[in-house]
Amino acid sequence: MKSFVKGLVRILILILLLILVMAPLARAGEWGVNLYGLSYHETRTYTDSSGNRRHWNETNFGLGLNQVFFRYKGGSLFHEEATYIDSKRRSQFYFMVGVKYEFLKNIELGTAAGRMATYNREVDVVGVLMVLSYHYRSVIFHLAAPPINRQAVALYMTIKLD
């Protein structure tokens, strides 16, 4: 079963990379800068690999890029690349491709898939990141349910450059 999942993940990543390569051919897209900051964890502490209880880091500063490269009837395809400090105080890098749909004026719901990497390991993320976004002028506020810790939510924002 694990080899099937790994194969599926590799195929999905290949498809996502092809979308990224083809997107600039379609049009320049709408670019934005992501500013990361906050997370909230339902369980206030965790046990580290040494067996010590630690408090989650809920100030997750970071910087990234966001591009909406296709829009159609209330829906959009986007990709993001970013680096930030995660909730265990590790440097994190990710890239992902996702889809969002505007279900109310200025409010979108979406999901994304991609690849995350910390300093010593990589984690495949497949379609489990849920994002709720609110557009206010040239700023978009995102509330995301991260894939690794399902008892947490993250808040970040995108400043549109267009």
Image: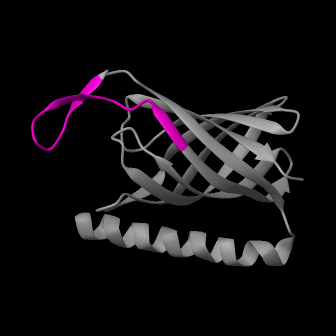
Query: Magenta segment, which residues?
Result: 45-61
Position above or below: 3 against 47: below
Residue 85: image quadrant is top left
Determine which quarter of the picture holds residue 37.
Answer: top right
Total numbered labels: 0
Magenta run includes residue 67: no
Q: Between residues 138 and 71, which one lies in front from this camera angle? A: 138
In depth, the one of 88 and 77 nearer the eye is 88
Name the one closer to the observer, 128 or 145. 145
Q: Position of residue 91 (x, y in %)?
A: 41, 53
Image spot of residue 17 (x, y percent): 59, 74
> Is residue 38 depicted above or below 16 in this figure?
above
Residue visible at 55% across and 61% down in the picture: 95
User: Residue 122 location, x and y as percent?
Assistant: 35, 62
Residue under the point 30% across and 68% down: 4
Using residue 117 as the reference point, say whether residue 109 is left or right of it: right
Q: Position of residue 45 (x, y in %)?
A: 26, 25
| Residue lying at 75% horizontally and 37% vertically, measured from the top left | 140
Q: How is the image coloured?
A: one colour
The residue shown at (82%, 78%) is 25
Q: Quadrant of the N terminus?
A: bottom left
Q: In the rendered view, tell whether residue 122 sits above or below residue 153.
A: below
